[in-house]
Image (tube, coloured by chain):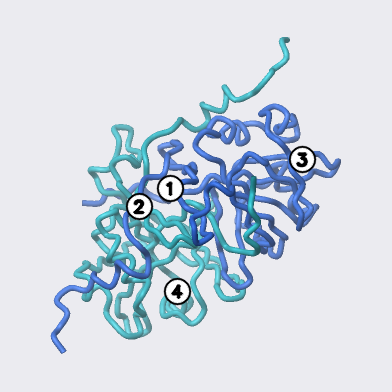
Chain colours: A cyan, B blue
Amino acid sequence: MHVSLGAQPFCLPLPVLLVGTYDASGRANLATAVYGGICSLQPPSFCVSMSRGSWTHRSIAERGAFSVGLPSRSMAAQADFAGLVSGRQEDKFAALGLTPAAGRHVDAPYAAECPVVLELALTHTRELGSHTLFVGEIMDLKVEREALREDGMPDPARLDILAYAPMAGEYLAMGGFVARAHAVGKTARRNRPEK
Amino acid sequence: MHVSLGAQPFCLPLPVLLVGTYDASGRANLATAVYGGICSLQPPSFCVSMSRGSWTHRSIAERGAFSVGLPSRSMAAQADFAGLVSGRQEDKFAALGLTPAAGRHVDAPYAAECPVVLELALTHTRELGSHTLFVGEIMDLKVEREALREDGMPDPARLDILAYAPMAGEYLAMGGFVARAHAVGKTARRNRPEK
């Protein structure tokens, strides 16, 4: 039985995204966002929605570049701080003891402590009311060496990444393996007629 | 130490989204997507990227409406199936034994078995190469009564929702509570000078 909660923004899980930019003075900044993810495969693209008027919003528009770092569970307090404080007021890398690394492909920094990092070149901007959707082409994916499987794919079990539950306002851990994609569905069809 | 994997689309976690539409003949259809999430707060908006040429892509564009259901862990095989088979070929609700419920606010169906459902009215469409980004205004959020906390918020621990890890191609469970948002960050500042 469903209860209708009205026009509430909800999705579960949301990723926790540490968005890295340089501001107009060239200072490296980090801001936490939970509205974003992959939005196209060809070209490989990632979108993130930033609140209008935020320091990072201005920096993405000015520089045409940003990074996204995925923090590990141990970085929950740092990720939360980066969403509470504006880069206009404070050097968040310094305040948090995080290391600003320069992107190799785009004009944006990232926190070297994040186990996953994407470098993004801005390709589209769309105003959506309170937020602006920025789409970036993925120029590079970096993953902590220890988190790669033998086939070279990022292993979610070794990444120990953080997730977010809106409305409840909780950071969550990821759970374990449930099923293999493009495989488990082959068993799902019910009452299939004999041929 | 990061390893550069090139221009790969990655994010962790991704949500598992069962996108519900009516096709031109009025038949209810479901398709699984993992590229999507909240994209604005005011108006509350949700985006989903669908592969061009997919049956659901056509239906969203034609009807200007869609739903998003979040499947529980027990629905992993059904969610995977809905991503493997096209609605052009098969009635997926029937094949999976799922119940098509009519949206109250928009012209789109949803699977009544999903513990979370959003009803969405299409507001923006953006071509992004292989995928089209559809933005919908959230007209209603429905949550299983048993998954609500005492304060009326959806409780991630009771929802037992499914997540997705790209590249590895794994469905994952969600883990437990790590920290409270807008709170734990207040402890994160290092070496704060005495005032």
Give the numbered dot on residue A60.
4
Question: Secondary structure beneath disc 4?
Answer: helix
Q: Residues within 10 Å of mark 1 (few under 14, many from 20)?
A: some
Residue labelled with disc 2? B177
Q: Chain of mark 4?
A: A
Where does the image place residue A30, in percent across and percent down from the top left? 34, 71
Q: Chain of mark 1?
A: B
Residue labelled with disc 1? B157
* Quadrant in the rendering for residue B87: top right
CB under 8 Å between discs 4 and 2: no
Q: Tell me the mark number nearer the camera, choosing from 4 and 2.
A: 2
- Precedes in sequence: disc 2 or disc 1: 1
Which residue is located at x 78 percent, y 45 percent? Answer: B22
- Precedes in sequence: disc 3 or disc 2: 3
CB under 8 Å between discs 3 and 4: no
Where does the image place residue B56, in percent across and percent down from the top left? 71, 44
